[in-house]
Every structure is written in structure tokens, then in C-alpha cells.
Image (cartoon, grey):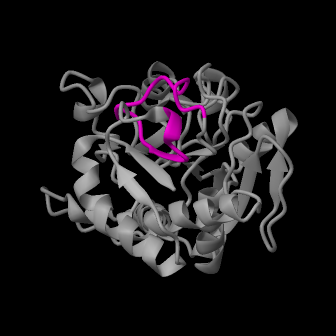
Amino acid sequence: MNVLFAAPATSWETYRAPLFRAFDQAGLQATLHTDPDAAPETVDYIVYAPAGPVSDFTPFSRCKAVLSLWAGVETIVLNPTLTQPLCRMVDSGLQEGMVEWVTGHVLRHHLSMDRHIVNPLHNWDPAVPPLARDRKVTVLGLGELGRACAQALRALNFAVAGWARTHHSLEGIPCLHGADGLRPALARAEIAVLLLPLTAETENLLNHERLGWMPEGAVLINPGRGALVDDEALLAALGRGGLSHATLDVFRTEPLPAAHPFWAHPQVTVTPHIASATRPETAAQVIVENIRRSEAGEALLFRVDRAQGY
């Protein structure tokens, strides 16, 4: 089979060996190349990432699936030339990395670590934090990553609830959904974690009104998508004291411009989109497993629902 690796050139060096290993382990024969102009009508599968060499999928008339290396697909899902099945990336390395980043920052805010780590006046502040069972955390977004983070936080004994646009069920974790469930989900959230996909329905989900539903002194943690939050509304909520802090890993423009007020704001932590990343070794296994499934006539993993946008 003919597989086109349509990602930025720098990615090929890190993915080449893991992909060949994964094909060997699966017992599949494949020709991998990086030239989208080399007989596109013969390509069976496209391994895709944004900013790669392919934006027009029309020439790939034989292509059976486009397999994204990214968890987010908002930059491609509405492409009118994409008529092939599209699969987003969910791999164990990406999931583990997200769980580690989210639990680390939830614990950081729960334990008020910043006041001891950054303490130039040497204030002796013996305030003891509550136990995790008394700290209410809401995870917004219950896909693969959201579920994994919610379950990890519950295992640490946090009082976790979840919210999603559609109904979900998680053992030991109350799950709210839809427009009616959003306000109570936010109203209980001493710490809110955003892990929603970016769609027309979720853009600016946390606006002035909805940020105002959160408890006074709440913390917002966003490793999902930058446009889930209205930046101006967030700054206003921090300014009036409604929110005590925002830890942000994703932004509307990346890298975050040097003049953006988030950089200098004392109640904002900026991390440079490192909450999690696709790991070539585990991602290659997901890519090859989906190709094996396609060749065997089985259902593809993590296939995107075009109507929902993820």
C-alpha cells in the first residue's frame, strides 16, 4: 500500500522509524513517502498534520482515510475537499501526558503551592488546604482525554463532576450535559478544567456571563483549545476578583504574542502548549492499527463525526 506522510518536514525525522517499526510489528507492507505530488491518485492513506503540504484532498481519489496526528481537527474538518474518512489522534502517550499535566496543576492550585514557591517577602503562612475530597473539580469535556483526567482526579479523591454537550456516564463521577447542565457544572467548580473540542458551539463557551457562574475565588485550567474562552471576559473576571487564577496552555494565537496581557498578569500562568503532545512511538501504533482495520474491513478508531465537528 502507498502511504503519504503529509506533515511538516521536521516531523518526518521523528516519525519515520516508529512508523516503519509499527508496520513491521503489524505484518503490513507499506511504501511511505512525503511527496504529495508523486502520483496522488495512487495514495491509499494520508498521515496528516496541519501546516503540512496537503490542503487540497481532491487529487487523492484512491485514499481510504486521512489519519490525523493531532487530537484537534478544527483546522481540517470543514475543508470542503476532504471527502475521505477522517480520524483524529488519540494515543496512550498523549493521554498520559495530559493526565500528568492536569493533575499536576490541579494539585498545585488545590494546595496553593504558588504562595510558598514564589514568596519573596518570606511570609510565614501556615494556612492548611482542605483535603481533596472537599475540593470540587469540574472537568468540561468528557472525550478520551477528559474522561482520563476526570478518573485520575477522582482516584486522588477529588470531588469530581463532568460536563459535556451530550450525555456521558462515568462510574463514581456525576456527569451533567447540555445547556441545562452547564450552569450547575460551573457553579460547583472551585477548579474547572477545559478539555472540550473547538466547534462552532464551544467557541467562547466561557464568556462574561458563564465565568460569572463560577464560585468566587475559583481557578480555571485550560489545556483544551484557546478559543473556548473569551480572553477579554477572562481578564475581566480576574480583575473583579471572581476568579483567583487562570492556568492556560492554549491560545488563539500561538506562540502567544509578547504584548498579550496574559504574560504580565499576576493571576495568569502561561505554559507554551505543552500540556500534552502526540508521541511518535505510540501515535505510529494508532496510525498503523487504523490502516490494518481499514484493510480488514473493520471500523476505524476515533473517526470524526463531521456533523459534530470532532
Relative placement, left or right, of 130 versus 173 is left
Picture coordinates of residue 107, whole percent (x, y): 45, 68
Residue ID at (38%, 64%):
279
Residue ID at (73%, 55%):
162
Relative placement, left or right, of 98 versus 185 is left
- Name the image quarter holding the C terminus: top right
Residue ID at (74%, 39%):
305
Q: Nearer the viewer, residue 275 or 136?
A: 275
Residue ID at (83%, 56%):
168
Secondary structure mostly seen in magenta is loop
Picture coordinates of residue 260, whole percent (x, y): 27, 23
Picture coordinates of residue 59, whole percent (x, y): 52, 26
Instruction: Look at the image and say whether residue 45 sits in the magenta stretch.
Output: yes
**Vertical position of residue 82 compared to residue 165: above or below:** above
Residues in magenta, as a range: 41-61
Q: Quadrant of residue 128?
A: bottom left
Residue 4 visible in the shown view: yes
Picture coordinates of residue 102, whole percent (x, y): 47, 61
**Vertical position of residue 36 compared to residue 112: above or below:** above
Q: Nearer the viewer, residue 70 or 146?
A: 70
Residue 115 visible in the shown view: no
Instruction: Look at the image and say whether residue 212 sits in the magenta stretch.
Output: no
Relative placement, left or right, of 189 versus 47 is right
